[in-house]
Image (spheres, helix red, strand yellow):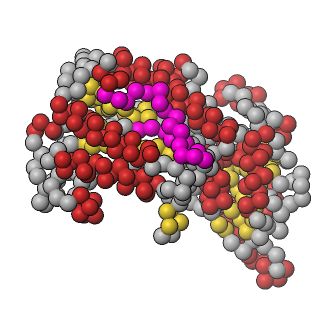
Amino acid sequence: MDLRIFGQRRDRFLEKLDGKAAVIPAASLVTHHADCEYPFRQNSDFWYLTGFDEPEAVALFLPHRPVGEQYVLFVLPKEPAIEVWNGFRWGTEGAVSIFGADISHPLNELHKRLPYYLKGAEGIAFRVGKHQKIEPLVLQVWAEQLDRLPRNGQGATSVVAPCPFLHSLRLRKDSWEVDRLREAARISSEAHELARTTACPGMSERELQAVIEHYFLSQGARGPAYSSIVAGGENACVLHYTSNSSLLLDGDLLLIDAGCSLSDYYNGDITRTFPINGRFSGEQKDLYELVLEAQLAALEAVEPGNNAEAVHMTAVKVLVEGLVELRLLRGNVDSLIEQGAYRHFYMHRTGHWLGLDVHDVGAYRLGEFPVELEPGMVLTVEPGIYVSDRLPVPEGQPSIQDRWKGIGIRIEDDVLVTNTGNDVLTTGAAKSVNEIQQ
């Protein structure tokens, strides 16, 4: 990994801060059972700016300080006795020599050094409510500055969230990030294809989950980006089904929503649905082709100048038109959409931003105005149809015949907005009827 990339990001972030000092903490270890920790996952904002993959650290970004004092890292110090148990630490020397900090201090000095570093800042950028250990220190420093403000006229007059400055940067991916997302998409796509060619009646969902996640690890990924969904039959109508404990039955569809996370936290997020025995029934094929038509139409809508809301509504219109044609809905298409009369079949949005987080940061709207798609943005496109008795049929709509019930279908790809349109990153996972049934 080229650590200069993080330096370029810091430069852009410092410029956006415009005289405010930012305090960005790393993630902490989280225990389970009595004294075991979950696998460590770095805070995405902290990682984006530092590339430093250790817990408990705190990064300061100080545009009001002179060059050579603008990036300060507080880290856990090197302690051989602890490293024997918990692994290697870079310590303060590594924070400077390897990770590019201007200055580094042991974490236990944060409380006494923070007032010095924040002195002279016009404001403090810190996410209140997220970092219980660090927040009291930041608020104490701010309170002391406010107390002195009437006498010396100097001090931070506000605490603001760093999110608007930082998340606008994260929303638009640079070429290096796009390459990493391509790699996550490749591994995730190949895992889906392996699962599709491996699945057969009598297997358990859990067995197929193991096939997918083993492939992630064999390709050098950190592991799954989120809890893999392997949902046979009616289980596919539970959007976040993760029990993965049922047997795969002949004649059912199988919905798999799974993606890998790379060592640097970039993620894939793919959903495919296919018949376990390799052949669609009539009802399954009708609904599958409808979802695919909606997805392909939504993909075409991904282009600069359009927006995520328009992509969603493109998919919704195709789905509602098809459901009316199949007599699962009744009425005027525009009225059905306006009334939301389709939502017992399709109850989620058509996609989300993708990057360091699976549901990545970045606004979809700025007040009344949707955010326009720009080159470098990456989003998922994932319409679906879920037919079950879990939600009531809206008044005036036809009751659902048994032959449709228990069919859950979602098709999801990862899509890069380009200068001329879009680039689907996950074409390696088959989705046409002919590819699936061959």
In the rendered image, residue 147, in percent from the top left (x then y), is placed at: 75, 77
Residue farthest toward the bottom in the current orientation of the protein: 150
The residue drawn where x is 43% and y is 57% is 309
Q: Name the side, left or right, on which 117 lies relative to 385.
A: right
Task: Tell me which residue sits at (18%, 34%) in the image.
Answer: 283
Which residue appears farthest toward the front when viewing the image? Answer: 420
Residue 38 in percent (x, y) is at 53, 34
Relative image position of residue 397 (x, y in whole percent) = 13, 56
Q: Considering depth in this image, is 374 or 224 the residue closer to the camera?
A: 374
Q: Residue at x 85, y 47 (%)?
A: 103
Q: Tell me which corner region of the image, top left, top right, bottom left or bottom right, holds residue 355.
A: top right
Task: Decide whether residue 423 is among the magenta residues.
Answer: yes
Q: Relative to residue 280, is residue 180 drawn left or right?
A: right
Q: Is residue 391 left or right of residue 42?
A: left
Q: Quadrant of the C terminus?
A: top left
**Identity of the residue drawn at 21% across and 47% down:** 323
x%, y% of residue 216? 51, 24
Magenta extent: 412-433
From where the camera sits, is residue 90 visible? yes
Q: Taking 276 as reference, is 284 above or below it?
A: below
Quarter-of-image position of residue 338: bottom left
Observer able to see residue 141: no
